[in-house]
């Protein structure tokens, strides 16, 4: 079978996606309240990880801010989830898609910021503990739970305002009474990312657009932020296929496979991209 990919921006733009988990353990974990942030907030010192004065990614150099004081900026937000669950953040913490955390290119690690969804006025406080993975020009990349709480449905491009909160200005109810708990070490180091060798996990192919759309919504609702829908030609007939990717190492692939299997989706295959 030969499949020629033709991605449709209009097709994706027309989708209404719910980020409320719908099955398995995800349904329990994604129902997050501010208690998850409360337990993480403290006036802790700047991390030894991820705070070089400047760093370069994909040929672009970023300057890390000396202080969060006065930082406020409007831009767009993306979100990331199960593909990176349990991997190490730039701040030497373990990424938890069910916590209120975020990645930012220039704010010190760790720090805290109020993020407001400009489309509905919802706002939360997130812990900035990562520098990526950014795959677009978004200002901030939210965890799955943070995006869910803000009502952000799109994987990228949601308009937000990010206002950093100096430690001394954190609301009293958010200040931790004890020092932050040490982060458990990762079972194995994160593999380096080689973007020249992408892989995709194919969840299924259907002749009916609505069937593929249902699968698209189902996968994004359990935290698979990299889910995408595409049209393909199969034996001269237009088909609709749902896949997760691009994925760049075995950890990402395994995380996606685990999520699919835990949600009763065992008929998938991994293919190399171009």
Image (cartoon, grey):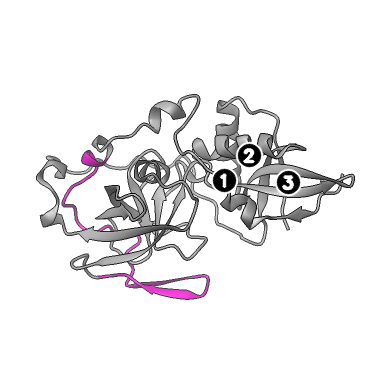
Question: How many C-alpha atoms fall within 10 Å of the one at disc 3: few (<14), some, or many (≥20)?
Answer: few
**Of all residues shown, which one is farthest toward the right?**
235
Instruction: Inspect the magenta stretch and tell me whether residue 53 lies in it.
Output: yes
User: Magenta region: which residues?
Assistant: 37-65
Apparent side of residue 34 relative to residue 195 in the rendered image (left or right):
left
**Disc 2 and disc 1 in contact, CB within 8 angstroms:** yes
Answer with left or right where residue 76 lies relative to residue 48.
Answer: right
Residue 90 location (% of width, % of height): 39, 56
Instruction: Answer whether residue 130 is magenta in the image.
Output: no
Q: Which mark is residue 213?
A: 2
Percent across and percent down for residue 214 are 61, 35
Front residue of 256/27: it is 27
The residue under label 1 is 15
Q: Nearer the viewer, residue 174 or 23?
A: 23
Query: In which quadrant will I find the N terminus?
Result: top right
Mark 2 or 1, nearer chain start: 1
Q: Earlier in the sequence, mark 1 or mark 3?
A: 1
Q: Nearer the viewer, residue 108 or 15?
A: 15
* Residue hosting label 3: 271
Q: Name the spot of residue 69 as percent of width and height, x first.
A: 18, 66
Dominant SS type (magenta): loop
């Amino acid at each position: 079978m030969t499949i020629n990919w033709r991605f449709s921006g209009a097709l994706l733009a027309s989708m209404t996606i719910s980020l409320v988990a719908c099955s398995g353990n995800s349904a329990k974990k994604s129902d997050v309240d501010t208690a998850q942030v409360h337990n993480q907030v403290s006036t802790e010192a700047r991390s030894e990880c991820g705070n070089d004065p400047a760093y370069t990614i994909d040929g672009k150099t970023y300057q890390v801010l000396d202080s969060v004081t006065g930082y406020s900026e409007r831009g767009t937000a993306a979100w990331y989830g199960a593909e990176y669950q349990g991997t190490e953040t730039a701040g030497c913490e373990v990424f938890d898609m069910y916590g209120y955390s975020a990645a930012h290119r220039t704010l010190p690690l760790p720090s805290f910021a109020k993020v407001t969804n400009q489309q509905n006025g919802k706002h939360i406080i997130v812990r900035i503990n990562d520098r990526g993975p950014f795959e677009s020009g978004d200002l901030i990349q939210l965890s799955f739970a943070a995006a869910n709480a803000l009502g952000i449905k799109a994987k990228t491009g949601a308009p937000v305002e990010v206002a950093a909160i100096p430690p001394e200005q954190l609301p009293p109810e958010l200040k931790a009474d004890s020092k932050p708990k040490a982060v458990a070490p990762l079972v194995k180091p994160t593999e380096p990312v080689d973007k020249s060798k992408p892989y995709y996990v194919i969840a299924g192919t259907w002749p009916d657009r609505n069937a593929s759309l249902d699968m698209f919504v189902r996968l994004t609702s359990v935290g698979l932020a990299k889910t995408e829908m595409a049209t393909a030609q199969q034996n001269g007939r237009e088909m609709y296929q749902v896949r997760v990717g691009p994925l760049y190492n075995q950890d990402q692939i395994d995380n996606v496979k685990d999520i699919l299997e835990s949600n009763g989706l065992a008929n998938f295959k991994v293919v190399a991209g171009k």
